[in-house]
Image: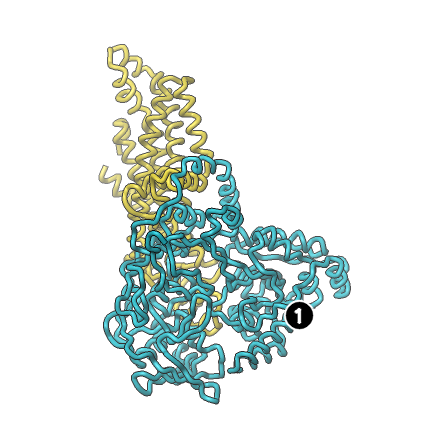
Chain colours: A cyan, B yellow
């Protein structure tokens, strides 16, 4: 919100910084509190109702109280949760999930297969007025039920108390990962209607109180099937301003903080603070969607020229202090299917001009470059404008608030749109499919309006392929194909930086937002 | 005076109706789609279409307006598109916190501002006057965002006297109230000073001195009381604006008030939340203005309603 000016002001604080530093009372000691305190939420969760979980703070809180059939670890691996194992029938459509025995909801009722069917049906039910049921839509009959065209979800069945059989409309190899998303959480069939105020799940934490825009307090679930969390309680504070979160961390009031992009360098150069830092290769791609249906941008040579014109390496070095990896495709290097040997577009202005001339634009082109108001994005946009101009691509920056820019891009009204994409689940499919498949043009995420039947075919094949190695190969081919077509200006994958207090052990900042449930986090005993 | 209050309150109805019309129209012609925020980055067109239909976003604007006015007339502000919570409950939870911060800031500003103003008017050009002038310039020039972060760095991170942010007891209130009240201290000091200079040079002050009144009686009872009208105006206006939007202060200090609520609602195009808050805050503003006008009469017996 308070963007450029705020940044200037923050920098100007450096002038007066010696004052507080001079009177600093030494490092804060291990606090006497017994509550773990998180500072990563920048706004209030929407709800604790899993059916409304479409954003990070909401998904994070939901993952403390609720669980699904599967879940992610902090390093983004898929592991069994409420289901101990699952089988896929040879048709590639029918999953049989075997539920974990001895699991109880926080209200004491035992988990049964009926609860799973109920939860999924509820999330899809138009009467729930949820909006987060996207991961359940691949189930056969789910879309019709959500549209009110069918009385129930035909692909859901509970043959006995400990077995759930899910039939998909089409084979989808990533389906077990979709079930680890917060919207696929399981709640008891007997749950009261006001799920958000009285959430009852099987998860490691129980909600104690929720002070909106202030904090959520959770107490450990003593009867958690995976063993009760080590700490007594967990407080998720909502801190809107990143500098404030850092101040809270420096005062010892919070246990973990994400270092804002413009402060990472200061932290990395301070030996005392450096040892608290952890790098997390975020599943976040920063890129410029190029609308492949607009004017000169229809020509792949023009789009390649845009890629050639920009010195991405320098942008990463100068604007995000090297905290990113130059992208040569949309798949983050840590995920299967990523081709880490593929060379990024080289910074070659002469070649960019040649490509433009060959495409019939020797005098260059005029485009609009849309961006949101995040300070880092605005700075990147300004750098891009400079690089593009040198190659004869005259870009005017259209800065709008996020909602406006996104709506315009979805309607296909933007030439270039500088944006980012966070993974909902750790799989190459979550980058290739929403961002570039023709089925997702517009609202689905493909704001490049990229349409390449060969790409769609490869991806369709990959989505059906149960063998992981073969699937990764297909992902790689699809990524490669799109990369040559340049439906976007490939920029970088951001590497997040977190600081964790020295008195905390058993906590690693997760790669995927719902991959860390704080169950093993605790205060380090004195003297260790 | 009761008749006056009744008339003013009656006049507030068309004002608020106007606010309602403008807020409704502006929000509905503004770019950005409320459903976007609800479905997140990845949506399928069918879900988007279903939600739009459920929220009646595709109905004709006049119909939606009539429906909304009907709802408001029945005391309902509706439910948030994003959270599904009743807007009235959201406002009821946050407004007391905004009020608390505004009152603290105003109290601080009034006590400090008027004192500074009186002290500097006593000896214009003296060291006290120059100091107060300096404070006033700084107060007006420093952006609240910057002051807020500075206060956190000095008093919370550096000196460890107060918590950096959050909501709780008195210790949590001091820094945000100071950051928020800074501008008012400055304004009130300046207004009090100039108004006091007039009053101290007026005939009635000379008369008071001539009849042998003690100096503090002259300054406080005779001069200050007469100098108060412009100060009350400033206090009223500032208080009204604090109640309706201490967005930056609330953001910097993680204060769970109405300002942040409104900003988040705007960012997410949560139409019922924005409309409801705007309407509520306008009502508050109207009320504060009324109270300010009534305070004039209290301060100056020549004003009667």
Q: Position of residue A197 (x, y in %)?
A: 28, 63
Q: Which residue is mark 1?
A: A485
- Tag 1, which secondary structure? helix
Q: Is residue B170 above or below residue A153?
A: above
Q: Is residue B225 left or right of residue B153?
A: left
Among the 4 quarters of the image, the one containing residue A78: bottom left
Bin the neighbour count of mark 1 within 10 Å (Cα to Cα): few under 14, some 14-19, many 20 and up: some
Residue at point 77%, 60% (across, down): A362
The percent position of residue A228, horizontal first and vertical second, equals: 29, 66
Looking at the image, the residue that sits furthest to the front is A527
Q: Is residue B174 above or below residue A298?
A: above
Please provide percent x and percent y for residue B63: 39, 64
Residue A354 in view, yes or no:
yes
Q: Compare residues A185 and B19 and report the one nearer the observer.
A: A185
Q: Is residue A126 visible?
A: no
Q: Residue furthest bottom?
A: A90
Residue A172: x and y, percent?
A: 49, 80
């Amino acid at each position: 919100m308070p963007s450029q000016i705020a940044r200037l002001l923050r920098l100007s604080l450096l002038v007066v910084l010696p004052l507080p530093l001079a009177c600093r009372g030494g490092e804060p000691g291990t606090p006497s509190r017994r509550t773990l305190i998180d500072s990563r939420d920048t706004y209030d969760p929407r709800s604790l109702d899993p059916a409304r979980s479409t954003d990070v703070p909401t998904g994070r809180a939901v993952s403390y109280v609720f669980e699904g059939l599967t879940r992610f670890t902090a390093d983004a691996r898929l592991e069994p949760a409420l289901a101990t194992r699952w089988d896929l029938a040879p048709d590639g459509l029918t999953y049989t999930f075997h539920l974990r025995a001895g699991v109880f909801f926080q209200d004491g009722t035992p988990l049964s297969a009926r609860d799973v069917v109920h939860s999924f049906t509820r999330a899809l039910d138009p009467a729930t007025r949820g909006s987060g049921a996207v991961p359940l839509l691949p189930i056969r009959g789910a879309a019709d039920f959500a549209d009110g065209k069918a009385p129930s979800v035909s692909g859901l069945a509970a043959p006995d108390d400990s077995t759930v059989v899910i039939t998909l409309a089409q084979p989808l190899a990533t389906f077990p990962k979709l079930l680890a998303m917060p919207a696929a959480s399981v709640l008891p069939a007997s749950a009261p209607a006001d799920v958000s105020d009285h959430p009852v799940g099987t998860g490691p934490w129980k909600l104690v109180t929720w002070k909106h825009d202030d904090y959520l307090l959770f107490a450990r679930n003593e009867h958690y099937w995976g063993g009760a969390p080590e700490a007594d309680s967990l407080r998720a504070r909502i801190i809107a301003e990143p500098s404030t979160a850092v101040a809270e961390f420096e005062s010892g009031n919070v246990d973990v903080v994400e270092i804002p992009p413009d402060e990472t360098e200061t932290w990395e150069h301070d030996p005392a603070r450096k040892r608290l830092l952890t790098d997390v290769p975020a599943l976040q791609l920063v890129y410029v969607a190029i609308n492949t249906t607009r004017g000169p941008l229809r020509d792949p040579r023009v789009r390649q020229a845009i890629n050639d014109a920009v010195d991405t390496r320098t942008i990463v070095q100068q604007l995000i202090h090297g905290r990113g990896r130059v992208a040569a495709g949309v798949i983050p290097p840590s995920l299967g299917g990523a081709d880490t040997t593929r060379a990024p577009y080289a910074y070659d202005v002469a070649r960019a001009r040649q490509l433009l001339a060959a495409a019939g634009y020797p005098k260059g082109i005029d485009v609009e470059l849309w961006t949101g108001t995040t300070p880092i994005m605005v700075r990147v946009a300004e750098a891009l404008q400079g690089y593009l101009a040198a190659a004869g691509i005259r870009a005017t920056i259209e800065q709008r608030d996020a909602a406006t820019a996104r709506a315009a891009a979805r309607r296909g009204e933007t030439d270039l749109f500088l944006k980012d994409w966070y993974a909902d689940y750790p799989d190459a499919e979550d980058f290739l499919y929403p961002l570039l498949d023709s089925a997702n043009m517009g609202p689905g995420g493909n704001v490049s309006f990229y349409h390449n039947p060969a790409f769609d075919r490869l991806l369709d094949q990959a989505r059906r392929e149960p063998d992981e190695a073969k699937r990764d190969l297909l992902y790689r081919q699809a990524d490669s194909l799109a990369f040559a077509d340049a439906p976007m200006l490939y920029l970088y994958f951001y590497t997040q930086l977190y600081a964790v207090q020295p008195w905390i052990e058993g906590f690693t900042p997760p790669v995927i937002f719902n991959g860390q449930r704080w169950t093993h986090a605790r205060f380090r005993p004195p003297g260790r | 005076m009761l008749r006056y209050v009744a008339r003013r309150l009656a006049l507030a109805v068309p004002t608020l109706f106007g606010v309602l019309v403008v807020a409704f129209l502006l929000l509905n012609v503004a770019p950005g789609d409320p459903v976007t925020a609800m479905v997140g980055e990845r949506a399928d067109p069918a879900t988007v279409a279903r939600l739009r239909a459920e929220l009646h976003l595709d109905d004709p604007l006049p119909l939606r307006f009539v429906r909304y006015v009907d709802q408001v007339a029945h005391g309902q502000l509706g439910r948030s598109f994003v959270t599904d919570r009743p807007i009235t409950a959201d406002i009821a939870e946050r407004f007391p916190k905004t009020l608390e911060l505004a009152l603290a800031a105003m109290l601080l500003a009034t006590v400090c501002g008027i004192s500074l103003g009186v002290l500097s008017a006593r000896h214009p050009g003296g060291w006290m006057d120059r100091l107060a002038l300096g404070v006033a310039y700084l107060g007006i020039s420093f952006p609240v965002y910057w002051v807020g972060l500075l206060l956190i760095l000095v008093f919370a991170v550096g000196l460890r006297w107060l918590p950096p942010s959050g909501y709780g007891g008195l210790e949590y209130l001091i820094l945000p109230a100071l950051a928020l009240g800074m501008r008012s201290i400055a304004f009130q000091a300046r207004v009090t000073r100039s108004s006091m200079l007039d009053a101290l040079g007026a005939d009635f002050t000379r008369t008071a001195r001539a009849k042998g009144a003690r100096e503090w009686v002259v300054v406080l009872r005779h001069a200050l009381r007469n100098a108060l009208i412009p100060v009350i105006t400033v206090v009223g206006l500032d208080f009204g604006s604090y109640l309706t939007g201490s967005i930056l202060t609330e953001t910097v200090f993680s204060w769970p008030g109405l300002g942040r609520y409104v900003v988040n609602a705007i960012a997410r195009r949560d139409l019922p939340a924005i409309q409801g808050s705007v309407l509520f805050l306008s009502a508050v503003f109207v009320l504060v203005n009324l109270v300010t006008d009534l305070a004039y009469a209290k301060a100056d017996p020549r004003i009667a309603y």
